[in-house]
Amino acid sequence: MIVGGVHGNEPAGYTAAGKVKDWDIKKGKLIVLPQANKKAVENKTRTYNGDLNRDFPQSSKESCDNTLSKSIYAAVKSYDVDWLMDMHEGYNYTKISDSVGQSLIYYPTTTTKTMASAIVSKLNSGISTSYKKFSLFRYPVEGSLARASGQYLGVHAFIFETSDNPSLSVRVNYHLKAADTLLSRLGVI
Ligand SMILES: [Zn+2]
């Protein structure tokens, strides 16, 4: 499952997800939610009716905070999602700021770590400036779709973050390259 537009002011994520939804697949099932928070995307704002990436359960007993998060979480459950990539953007490169731009943040399992490392290596092989290289982090923030899916539903889940600095097409291509690496390695494409 590929998700974009959880935050409406992160255009590389929802632009890339909008392209991935048209990819041909040869195996399995590819579910794409290009504009998770459609109202936020329309308004070009990070949030709309609260931060969607804090609305998911923060314990095994907790439920989602609202109808939108509830519907997305229900889809993850009902499709029994195996892998989840949530496309985001940070405001700066993580190696030179407090932002998480240019990073992959995964919920740790051995399998997810192997995949996450492969994606980061693939992207970094095409980036020569060291502070622009992708970093690998663990534990998506509590309340995020990736965290709740990974921790409570057993999904191999990660957030992929580009940095706001380069041009939109460069950032979109990073997302597409990451999604391509994930889906190719899984044999989906
Ligand atoms: Zn975001």
Image (spheres, rainbow, N blue to C red):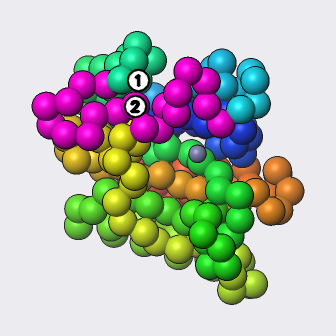
Residue lying at 74% horizontally and 21% vertically, measured from the top left: 42
Q: Type of residue at label 1?
A: Ser
The answer to whether residue 65 is above or below residue 53 is above
Horizontal relation, residue 18 to residue 3: left or right = right
Residue 49 is inside the magenta segment: yes
Q: Where does the image place residue 179, in percent across and percent down from the top left?
A: 55, 50
User: Which image quadrant is residue 96 in?
Assistant: bottom right
Horizontal relation, residue 150 to residue 51: left or right = left
On the image, numbered disc 2 is attached to which residue? 55
Mark 2: few/some/many CA within 10 Å (<14, 14-19, 20+): many
Q: Where does the image place residue 178, in percent across and percent down from the top left?
A: 56, 57
Q: Where does the image place residue 118, in percent across and percent down from the top left?
A: 45, 70
62 or 164, which lies in front? 62
Q: Type of residue at label 2?
A: Asp
Residue lying at 66% horizontally and 18% vertically, measured from the top left: 39
Quarter of the figure with the N terminus: top left
